[in-house]
Image (tube, helix red, strand yellow):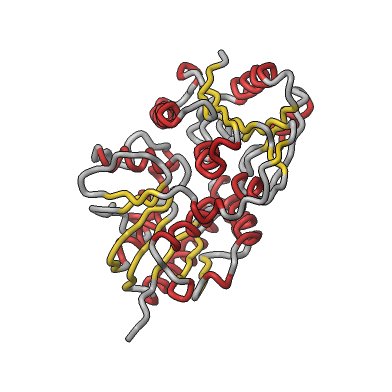
Amino acid sequence: MTEPINLFLISTPLQLINVIEAKRELNIPDEHSVAIFITYSSNLITLKKIINGSQWKEMHFIDDDIESLRKHEKNFKNRKILPVIKKAIANLAKIKSLIRKFKEVDRLIVGYYLGMENLHMMNNIRYKSLYLLDDGIATIEVNERRKNNTSFLKNQSIEFYLKTWFKKYIFGYKLSHPTSVNFFTIYDIAVGPNDSIVKHNYTEVKKLIKGLEKTDEVFFLGQPLSEIHPEIVTEETYLHYLREIKKYFSKSNLVYIPHRDELPDKCSRIEKTLSIPIKRLDLPIELFLLNQIKKPCLLSGFITSALPNCKEIFGDELEIIAFRINPQKVISKTMLVMVENTYAYFEKISNNKFKVISID
């Protein structure tokens, strides 16, 4: 009798953390687990540091060459069409090969739901059940769109439209959305009639906590809010908020933790112009804090999913503040919906240790 295969499609370090919980909750043994990694260069660097090969029957990478990925990302950014097409053809060939190899699985567990490679595999691999791992606060947006039957193309960036058109009509990607999914999530969400939810609270991850002694540091978790497309706020607005946040924590030792996708020039201005020291981490903040004997006395940020994640992991042992961005400061009306949905959720889970604060 053929052993059942549980196939995991993984893109980010956070998704890999959630895999730990999914395996325990769904009773999936390592010897029946196969991972396919489809990711960007910045994520791949971190993933390679935390992947444990013994937890998988097999591991497959669409591309595990960091320099090759960086070159492709640069070509895409600079609109170098021919090398981008060549790379896309090579990736699709690998994906088709994996679809043939794993044409039927027991469970299909997906990290990045909107990843077109992932959607294509969801449409071509037969599975008994489909689970969506948390992909940060994107889980909230994905659920809202599925529940309200809102097109995933609505209010997206022009880049997203072009990429979707290109992969669907030139390369033949199947991008239909599944009729039903199981959300494997820490979020307290109400799902649509065809979907279901498996709630978890990082039971396994909590076992990794090494200590709860605190330092006098306040960590602020940076985000590329002025770098992404469409951008959420201007860099000027972002720096303005940081000035106000520095005043708010004037009696504390504020430390800025940059996101891997933030521009070096912006981080330099934060450090030199605003005089906020920067601490670069080579792990997701959740894993970094788990492995520290001493924790910061407070964690803060804007709309990063690390805030509710750390609330769930550390509970009352870690104070957390989400600073609210004034909706009038949000440039993209597309992104405004996501921003407001995120703060609405933060308000819903707020308590004396998890606060949402406006500072302008």
> In the rendered image, is residue 334 in sight?
no
x and y, in percent, of residue 73 in the image: 57, 51
Which residue is at 42% across, 37% downward?
157
Please identify the quadrant where the N terminus is shown.
bottom left
In this rendered view, identify the residue nearer to me: 29 or 86: 29
Query: How many circles with numbers are drawn on the protein?
Result: 0
Compared with 212, 43 (above or below) is: below
In this rendered view, identify the residue nearer to me: 245 or 185: 185
Which residue is at 45% across, 47% downward?
201
Compared with 139, 323 (above or below) is: above
Which residue is at 53% across, 17% downward?
358
The residue furthest bottom is: 1
Which residue is at 69% across, 40% downward?
295
Please identify the quadrant where the C terminus is shown.
top right
x and y, in percent, of residue 98 in the image: 42, 72
The residue furthest left is: 193
> In the rendered image, is residue 58 in sight?
yes
Q: In the displayed structure, does residue 94 sit left or right of residue 69? A: left
Compared with 71, 263 (above or below) is: above
Q: Quadrant of residue 51?
A: bottom right
x and y, in percent, of residue 180 in the image: 25, 53
x and y, in percent, of residue 214 in the image: 71, 37
